[in-house]
């Protein structure tokens, strides 16, 4: 039976191969195998979504991290922001100033608080 390291390697490979759908499926499969995705799992999934310009999926993964009490790292935050910027630049419906306040709150955290100081 595969363990977290194997799943993380698979998710990371999907990210590098620009296969965001497969990365998302591996995250689902990981949970079904009763393995809890960690920060590495989520960050790789967010990066895969970023490369696929799937800003809503990336933001959803960031939200899920908070729900399971995982502290997002700089890769997680920058992946979500980059996905949003790419989508906005292509006219794909991501307008950062218009994001719901509850979702903007997801982007606030120790990474941004410390960089703003």
Image: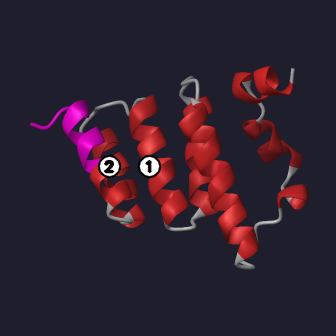
83 sits left or right of 85 in the view: left
With respect to residue 1, does 80 lie above or below? below
- Which residue, given by chain and number where applicable, does mark 1 sit on? 45
Residue under the image location 40 percent in, 56 percent down:
24
Residue under the image location 70 percent in, 26 percent down:
111
Q: Which residues are magenta?
A: 1-12
98 sits left or right of 6 in the view: right
State the separation of the CA atoms marked 1 and 2: 6 Å
With respect to residue 26, does 65 lie above or below? above
Where residue 75 sits: x, y (%)?
A: 55, 38
Sort mark 2 into few (<14), some (14-19) or many (20+) by Cα contacts within 10 Å.
many
**Nearer the N terminus, badge 1 or badge 2?**
2
Where residue 92 sits: x, y (%)?
A: 70, 77
Magenta includes 11? yes
Where residue 21 sits: x, y (%)?
A: 39, 65
Magenta-colored segment: predominant secondary structure: helix
Q: Nearer the viewer, residue 90 or 95?
A: 90
Sort mark 1 into few (<14), some (14-19) or many (20+) by Cα contacts within 10 Å.
many
- Which residue, given by chain and number where applicable, does mark 2 sit on? 11
Magenta includes 6? yes
């Amino acid at each position: 039976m595969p363990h977290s390291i194997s799943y993380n390697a698979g998710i990371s490979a999907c990210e590098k191969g620009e296969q965001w759908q497969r990365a998302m499926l591996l995250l689902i499969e990981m949970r079904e195998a009763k393995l809890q995705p960690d920060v590495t799992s989520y960050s790789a999934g967010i990066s895969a979504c970023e490369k696929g310009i799937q800003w809503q999926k990336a933001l959803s993964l960031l939200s899920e991290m908070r729900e399971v009490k995982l502290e997002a790292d700089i890769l997680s935050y920058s992946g979500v922001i980059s996905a949003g910027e790419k989508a906005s630049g292509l006219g794909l419906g991501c307008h950062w100033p218009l994001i719901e306040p509850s979702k903007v709150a997801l982007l606030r955290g120790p990474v941004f608080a410390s960089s703003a100081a």
